[in-house]
Amino acid sequence: MEEHIVIIGNGISGVTAARHIRKLSDKRITIISAETEYFFSRTALMYIYMGHMKFEHTQPYENWFWKKNRIELKKGYVKNVDTSAKTLHFAEGEPLTYDKLIIASGSKPNKFGWPGQDLDGVMGMYHKQDLENLEKYAPNNKVCKRAVIVGGGLIGIELAEMLNSRNIPVTFLVREDSFWNGVLPIGESQMINRHIKNHHIDLRLANNLKEIKADKNGKVKSIVIQETEEEIECDVVGLTAGVTPNINFLKESNIELGRGIKVNPYLETNIQDVYAIGDCAEQHEGINGRRPIEAVWYTGRMMGETLAQTICGNRIKYNPGHWFNSAKFLDIEYQTYGWVFSERSCPDYEKHFHWKHEDDTKCITVAYNKDTRAFLGINTFGIRMRHETFNKWLTEKRDVDYVINHLSEANFDPEFYSHYETDIIATYNKQLKIA
Amino acid sequence: MSNKINHSMSLAKPDALDITTKQKIALAIGFIGLFILALALFNTNFPNEGLFLTISLGMISLGIIMYSREAYLTKLEGIKNDGVWFKSISSKGTWGWILGVILTTFYIVLYFFPQYLGLGKDGAANTGLIQLFDPLSKLLSGRPASQWFVYGSLYTIAILAFGYKFILKYRHNRYQQIRTGSVMFFQLGFAFLIPEFMYVMNNDLPYYDLKSVWPLNYYIFDEWSVNGFLSNGNIGLALIIFGILSTFVITPILTYKYGKRWYCSWVCGCGGLAETAGDSFRQLSSKKMSAWKLERWLIHTVLVFSVVMTVAMVYTYLGYDKNNFWLTRGLFIAFVIGFLSLVFTGVMVFKAKELGKDAKYGAIGFFIVIALLLIMHFTGTTDNVFFIKGATLRSAYGLYIGSIFSGVIGTGFYPILGSRSWCRFGCPMAAILGFQQRLFSKFRITTNGGQCISCGNCSNSCEMGIDVRHYAQKGENIVRSSCVGCGVCSAVCPRGVLKLENDSMDGRINPTEILLGNDVDLMDLVNKK
């Protein structure tokens, strides 16, 4: 009998692990999900609401794929995990035994104990069920006359874009005094502030939520802003103030938990044959200066690839390469390679070169070590850049002058696009002279 | 919850789909323009046809232009796909089906019953819709209109007006703008105006759209066509030499340098219509594996059919007692077999590995063609090939492939099968270009390292039904014979993952299993297999 690998969660981490285990072995594989029958791309949920795609288009594999690759799918909610008997108990139905367990249960939206946070019409934007909820409470601008979004991060701005696509007025409460400035340097953050406003979104910086008020049916009626006591009438409140590992079902188990599921660099938990990957995994210490919990699509995928090796007899550490990420702020694409810190978390040695195009939709920030002039990373907005090139430059430890002068090699914009390298180099040289 | 959710999952119709007052006016203007054409179709006699034709075509164009300006210029530049899957017309809803039926009916009448459009038989004057177009035709070439002139005019208007719409939709993307400018230019100039002017200069020359290359232009080597060219001195000879060069020299060179996109999405008229008027339907093409399998069988079968048919045609008229050509049947057959064998051997020697399992199918296809040609040569009488008249074969091709497949299904079914079903499943030219693109071209769509988030926008907008995401999410470049290089996958990607490029042949196809961003040792380990 082949070993039975059970995976909780059919997101990118769990599915990647399953696919790679299948490539490497003939083990029996079962994936469990309470959310959907088949794997879909969470990052694409927004496009369903916007009408760019239907739900089925967000599924990267056709439905026959799973059977063909002998990956069993089980829909069910795991209530608790009995690690001593290696058994999973479900909210409904028969228990399931495993030989090895991979927990990839992802995240859930943060709620910070706001009054009214569980009212009808209040939702996060993470699960498919959140999308269905949004369809119910915000199908159009007659049913939903205004929506308030609380929390200025990547999910918040996506939710704003979604609502905007149906002409629903949006008030966007952001705790920080500039959008996402805990991550983005100020020049970029302010450009995004302006871009949000250009889309007629009512952006309220340095504004916190005090409470959500209900109508007589227990549905959202309005919100109150802490700083000004202003009351804003609305039909939907989106809570997008970050996410937290989705691990409540493990509270009773012997698995060690912190904010997430504690794992060592091999992605192993304190219990033999139980592993955790993706958003729900928490490293005892961040690897290579990364955060202990990385709730990013790409890192989930990498953990899945790594763990598949370990499960199949080649025990290796999760050892990600150079950091990269991407996002889109309404019409402005963002990519990052290496590390660029915002002013709020910038180490002493890190200095920035910033260039912004006059049309206010394109800019780059290059971070470097002011003592050694080593290139540390780049943020690029509105200009696509080549992952491979930056990965190479970071590995080769190029200095900032080299990177600026060779930027055109990294350009990944479509053919016939205008190029800005000349202008960037000129700006860079001018700044050098002043400094 | 079932995946077969209702259209939008909404309880109410999403409001964003409502159009503005200006757009309603624009629609009214456009439909009044169309209504004039409908009246003409039912034999209304207009007092001044030239005036009414101008008003009609003008109003149709104006309607489209006004509608597009209101749709796109009122918003910031960016991806404009909001509500595509909510709208009935672009998501196989009621309006989509109605439009499909109207278009299909139009094509059936156009190809098989032109008298209903008002074509005058045996020199009789035109009536109805075709009569309405007489003034324009007379202005351009001095002769009365035909059903093809009506069709060509409407086709050109569609490409120009919807091309304008497309340019506004992608006004942040210069690749899309320039490419669309190109198809608009080639349609107006090469397909519409130049042939008319050529007729004015020399009215014995057969209709020749210079950019239409064999085998898409399947009638260029027909007897009447070749005779027409050869009886017209140097200009005719030059044209037919250009026709042969376009197929055997110009096409391979350009496809090597730029991929088949130089033709399919920059020059071709069928492609031009699909990219402009058909843009709203691009997401309807099936991305299923089964559709891909069907595509590969169908398109290559059409290719074999078109090669055999053309050879049989030429072979037939070379066999007449009074052969006006220096070429003899034996020489011709030897030449064709020699050429095919050369291509076949070259591919098998240099590219068999890249073809993998397909090499076997390719070989079978090749030997079938050769066998057919030899049987033809040794059993053929003067006018029979495979015991069938060559002309019968030609008319079967013209009917089933040239008319029904490319027109009735290819365009009529836009709102059902997506905008490129002819290009994808039927076009023999696309098959040849694709074969070369897959094996011998510098073109590819580069995937940007590990940045893909598997969202599916690329696959959704691929009019050729390529599951682009399947490659992108593995960090693999996209090198597919069917890719027409329209560049929309790259345009709609929210993470900047895809780029159309012409680069060196080395490393063009990069099957990677582990993506960039991961530990280098792990990449080596997994990719070893």
Image (cartoon, coloured by chain):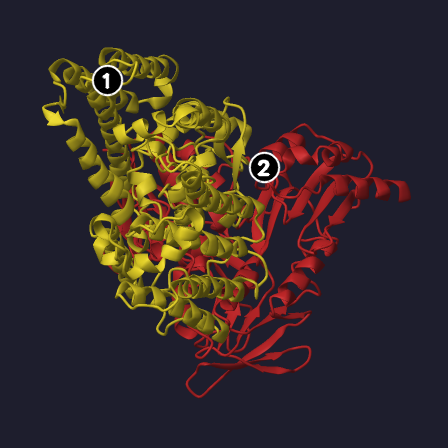
Instruction: For marks 2 and 1, give the one nearer the viewer.
Output: 1
Q: Looking at the image, can residue B294 be seen?
A: yes
- Closer to the camera, B483 or A411? B483
- Closer to the camera, B69 or A364? B69
Residue plotted at (41% across, 72% down): B28
Q: Most extreme residue toward the left, as rendered?
A: B387
Task: Measure how far apart labels 2 and 1 are at the Cα level.
Answer: 64 Å
Toward which corner of the image does residue B432 lie, by quadrant?
top left
Q: Which residue is mark 2?
A: A387
Q: Secondary structure at mark 1?
A: loop
Q: Looking at the image, can residue A435 be seen?
A: no
Chain holding disc 2? A
The type of residue carrying mark 2 is His
Q: Which residue is mark 1?
A: B323
Q: Which quadrant does the N terminus of chain B fall into? A: bottom left
Percent from the top left, x then y, of residue A358?
74, 54
What tint does the image give chain A? red
Percent from the top left, x then y, of residue B68?
50, 62
Percent from the top left, x then y, of residue A240?
54, 64
The type of residue carrying mark 1 is Asn
Q: Is B340 on the left-hand or right-hand side of A153?
A: left
Which chain is yellow in the rendering? B
Q: Is residue A24 above or below residue A229?
A: above
